[in-house]
Amino acid sequence: MTVKELKQFFGDPVLFAIIVYFFTADVYMAGNGIKLNLHNASVMVIDHDHSAASRELIYRFRPLILI
C-alpha cells in the first residue's frame, strides 16, 4: 500500500511541487522572515503610587543611551 501511494505521489508533479514548497521553502521563509525583536516602542506609565519602588520600575523602562 505504501509503495502504491509513493508511486502516485511521485507521479503527480503538481502535488509533489506543492508538498516540497510547503515543507521546505515556506517553513524556511517563516522561520527567517518573522522577527520577534521589539524596536522603538512607546511606553506610557501612570504612577498613582509615587513610591520609591514605582520610580525605580519606571526608571528601568527608560532607554539606554550608549555613548
Image (cartoon, grey):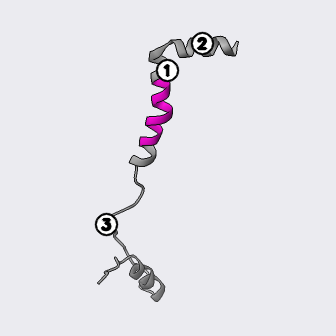
In this figure, which residue is indicated by the disc labeled 3?
A: 42
**Type of the residue with mark 3:** Ser
Q: Mark 2 points at which residue?
A: 7
Q: 55 or 48, which is in the foreground?
A: 55
Q: Earlier in the sequence, mark 3 or mark 2?
A: 2
> Which disc number belongs to residue 16?
1
Which of the marked residues, 3 or 1, is nearer the chain's N terminus?
Answer: 1
Q: Is mark 1 on a helix, strand or loop?
A: helix
Q: Which kind of residue does numbered mark 1 sit on?
A: Phe
Question: What's the residue at 57%, 11% (across, down)?
Answer: 8
Is the magenta region chiefly helix, strand or loop?
helix
- Residue at image x 33%, y 63%? 39
In the image, 16 versus 46, the foreground residue is: 16
The amino acid at mark 2 is Lys
Quadrant occupied by the N terminus? top right
Badge 3 marks a residue whose secondary structure is loop
Q: Give the range drawn in magenta.
A: 18-29
Quarter of the figure with residue 38: bottom left
In this rendering, is residue 62 above or below 23? Answer: below
Q: Nearer the viewer, mark 3 or mark 1?
A: 1
Q: Are marks 3 and 1 in contact (CB under 8 Å)?
A: no
| Nearer-the-camera pick, 17 or 39 | 17
Q: Do the residues labelled 1 and 2 touch (CB within 8 Å)?
A: no
From the viewer's perspective, is residue 54 above or below residue 9? below
Residue 65 part of the magenta segment: no
Q: Position of residue 6 (x, y in %)?
A: 61, 16
Q: How crowded is mark 2: few (under 14 residues within 10 Å), some or many (20 or more)?
A: few
* Position of residue 7 in the picture relative to residue 47 (left or right): right
Q: What element carries label 2?
A: helix
